[in-house]
Image: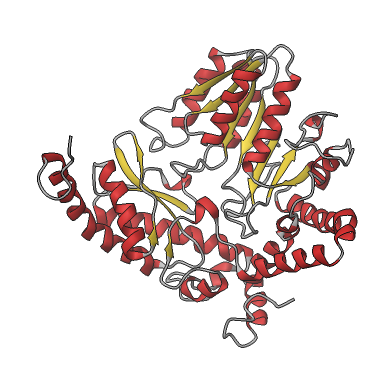
Amino acid sequence: GMAPGAHLSLVAGCLLFSSVSAVHTDAIDLKDGTDKFGHKLRNEFYFAPGFTNFNHGSFGATPRFVMEAQRRYQEQAESRPDKWFREDYQVLVEASRTTIASYVNAKSAADIVIIENASAGVNAVMRSLAMEWHDGGVILFLSCAYGMVKNTAHYLEQTARGVKTVEVVLGEDFPSGGDESVLTPLKKALKKYRGAIKLFVISHIASVPGVVMPVEAAIRMCRDTTIAGATPIQVLVDGAHALGQVRIDLQALGDPDYYLSNGHKWFYTPKAAAFLYVRKDRQLPTSPEPTVISSSGKQDFVGRFDYTGTRDYSAFAAFSDAFRFRSWLGDDLIYHYNSQLAQWASHYLSRRWGTRALAPPHMQAYMINVQLPTNSSAAGAALHDRLQQDYDTYMLSLSLGDVVYTRLSAQIYLERSDFEVLADRVERLLPAIERELQLEVTGSGPGASVP
């Protein structure tokens, strides 16, 4: 198939890039994003002309190279359907699993399966465990857990015998207080419910605000008998945002019981590709079971997840092509560029707007959380709408306590100028939006509400 960049007007683009990945990153000047990254890479994606995406984190963006590979798999499936479903795709998925296993430092590829998304992984693990706990137990999670985690836990509380949920409410010092703003309330909860907690769910990178969590320390706490009690608490790490945004080393994290991450958010796979890691001693004959039990009759961990009915498995196969795309650009360079850009943008925007970044630098990866220059969440919401409608720019507007902020994603197709333009627009639009809202509140002007 066509190498990535063959549709760039770079002479011998491939040669140029593959040699780059071998060079030590410091030797390459990426300071202003003018090397090979930034707007030059926009053509590698499918973005509409004039569209600016500051929210890569929610749904990612799949490169042309990877989607072209995916379409070839789809055509292969249709060319000989039986051969694809009975033989071909399993071989491709096994190649993907093997590559992921070494990339995240899993002990064996037999401990990794490919699933559609983080939701499928969390559901498979939590629902299987709830079925296994004949005498119930407590599922513990943090207040910044993703909604899907809370919803699944609450569903189990209503339907599975003896299952209770406990939410650890993080204080006003989260995330500005760093790791301790997570670990102190967690420790209190572990001691309070000691002996009752069966599972703790923690994000590797929380979604809102987008911050890197102290996962390794939290796992240690759940295994510390002086804190958690005699039986170690099982830990499920929801790494939805992690793969491709931070380096995942399962052994360095303390080898969690369960770990999952999406490929489509930060790793450039097509939509609906993720992985689930289950430590060998947690792979039971009926747990975790995928949420869809198929006709395959396979009993082993990998086999159960291998086939979950007739569906499009091309995204699973294309995981390998996402690796190819990344190595063409230089995997190290992607981390280097995105983290540098995020760090710069965090300083720049908070200085321009006279506000602050919500989290300390070590808790930031490619997602930054910057306070907007307004105290009105209604103004923040209106700003989001105006940017989308008038400027074809997607920027989230969020609130944490009284703070109105935006979560912005740095990415290889963005550069400093994008954040400079955003800073200007926000500075120009917000005062006008606040005036309009003020008129609505006082009941004069075109926006006045009728009783």
Q: Is residue 256 visible?
A: no
Answer left or right for 182 relative to 257: left
Q: Is residue 169 above or below residue 309?
A: above
Q: Place residue 66 in its image quadrant.
A: bottom right
Horizontal and vertical percent for residue 165? 56, 20
Q: Residue at x 18, y 40 (%)?
A: 449
Q: Is residue 244 visible?
A: yes
Q: Place residue 31 in its image quadrant.
A: bottom left
Q: Residue at x 48, y 30 (%)?
A: 182
Q: Residue at x 83, y 53 (%)?
A: 94
User: Residue most toward the front?
Assistant: 451
Horizontal and vertical percent for residue 54? 43, 58
Q: Residue at x 27, y 62 (%)?
A: 425
Horizontal and vertical percent for residue 82? 89, 58
Q: Nearer the viewer, residue 319 or 270?
A: 270
Answer left or right for 258 relative to 218: right
Horizontal and vertical percent for residue 30? 48, 70
Numbered disc total: 0
Quadrant (top left, top right, bottom left, bottom right) of the C terminus = top left
Q: Is residue 433 above or below residue 80?
A: above
Answer left or right for 302 relative to 375: right
Render colour scheme:
secondary structure
Quadrant (top left, top right, bottom left, bottom right) of the N terminus = bottom right
